[in-house]
Image (cartoon, rainbow, N blue to C red):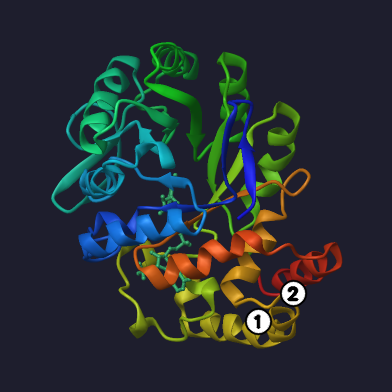
Amino acid sequence: MRIMKIGKSGIDASVVGIGAWAIGGDSMWGASDDAESVRTIHRARELGVTLLDTAPAYGLGHSEEVVGKALAGRRGEYVLSTKCGLRWDVHEGAFRQERDGARLVINTRPERIAEEIEISLRRLRTDYIDIYIVHWQEQPEFPTPIADTMGCLTRLKEQGKIRAIGASNLSDAQFLEYVQAGQLDLIQEKYSMLDRGAGDRLFGLCGQYGVTFQAYSPLERGILSGRITDRSQVYMGTARSQVKWFAPENLAKIAALSGKWAPLCKKYGCTMTRLVIGWTAAQGDGGSVSVLCGARKAYQIEDNARGGDVVIDTADVAAMRKDVEAIA
Ligand SMILES: NC(=O)c1ccc[n+]([C@@H]2O[C@H](COP(=O)([O-])OP(=O)(O)OC[C@H]3O[C@@H](n4cnc5c(N)ncnc54)[C@H](OP(=O)(O)O)[C@@H]3O)[C@@H](O)[C@H]2O)c1
């Protein structure tokens, strides 16, 4: 497993991370087996995956609780990230979504974050978070200056409760506000070879300011594993039903891509998943993208983790880009 630096924080983490969104087991992804989730997180570490990401909103606290169980007695072995600013336990904020009987709002006010981190630390059974990420950004109907949010996060860092600050789902202007207000070490953005927009906007800025670009949903919710050929094979919760690639005609395009890349898989001795992860890691300024894949089953992390060893030749990276540009 290759290791990379997280911004200027001094933290080293595996290039491939394990994301615990589906581990929350809510209507977004369908029920999870908690014992299997814990085993998957432990298996990840055996395979060299140190980066572990969760959020309070995943399963409305459940993902953090399962991650907390997995971390018991092993906290120092992982680079743990969780998030703030998306609440279902407070009323005030910008409406984000209704699900599982809860109303989620975006609230990035300093006093709310100061209380939210204590709840996360309890669920995660730890006294520090390695990378604390602002999940969604303030909205015009409930404004909070980014400088105020950053002020609070910087204080948490001084108190030793967090080691690095991250932000997610950003506009270019918001990125600039963050770096002007303090030390931003990581941004977490939706990025896959089928959905490259965030990279086109933000790779250059990340390179310029020394911020790590972390790609979330790099497998397009499992599609880019090449294993899903029909919607009936997976739980089509909210997380998947909005993804256009699950339409039958699009799944056929992915199947064709998988066939076309069979010689590349042979060349690199890997599965399609690993080829895709290797390609994703090679993007960004100087090929330095952190690839955050979701996994809640052992076979998935065994596949994904090994993607962290796949280094694809520049010519093949370019040829693969042409292939995906032809369909997305
Ligand atoms: N900041 C944000 O707003 C934000 C948003 C989304 C995600 N994230 C983070 O990013 C992480 C990754 O995103 P994601 O979960 O959408 O990523 P993804 O890697 O695109 O999809 C993960 C899902 O694909 C399936 N899968 C994974 N590996 C597989 C493999 N090797 N073969 C076959 N199927 C496989 C699993 O589905 P099943 O579990 O159904 O089998 C898994 O839950 C999340 O877990 C979360 O930590 C952050």
Whether residue 293 sits left or right of residue 268 in the image: it is left
Whether residue 145 sits left or right of residue 214 in the image: it is left
As drawn, 106 above or below 21? above
Q: Which of the 4 image quarters holds residue 256?
A: bottom right
Question: 90 or 6: nearer the eye?
Answer: 6
Question: How much space separates mark 1 and mark 2, taking CA atoms?
Answer: 8 Å
Q: Residue at x 70, y 27 (%)?
A: 209
User: Which quadrant is the N terminus positioned in?
Assistant: bottom right
Q: Which of the 4 image quarters holds residue 13?
A: top right
Ligand 1, by image quadrant, is bottom left
Residue 216, image x and y in percent?
A: 51, 52
What residue is disc 2 on? 323
Residue found at the very far right of the displayed protein: 315
Whether residue 194 sits left or right of residue 325 in the image: it is left
Helix, strand, or loop for circle 1? Answer: helix
Instruction: Kindly tell me whether residue 304 is visible in this rendering.
Output: yes
Marks 1 and 2, the one that precedes in the sequence: 1
What residue is disc 1 on? 257
Instruction: Kindly tell me whether residue 194 is visible in this rendering.
Output: no
Residue 147, image x and y in percent?
A: 49, 14
State if disc 2 and disc 1 touch (CB < 8 Å): yes
The residue under label 2 is which amino acid type?
Asp
Q: Residue at x 64, y 32 (%)?
A: 211
How many numbered callouts? 2
The residue under label 1 is which amino acid type?
Leu
Q: Residues within 10 Å of mark 1 (few under 14, many from 20)?
A: some
As drawn, 257 above or below 58? below
Residue 54, image x and y in percent?
A: 36, 45
Q: Residue at x 34, y 16 (%)?
A: 110
The label number, if any, that marks residue 38 in the structure image:
none
Helix, strand, or loop for circle 2? Answer: helix
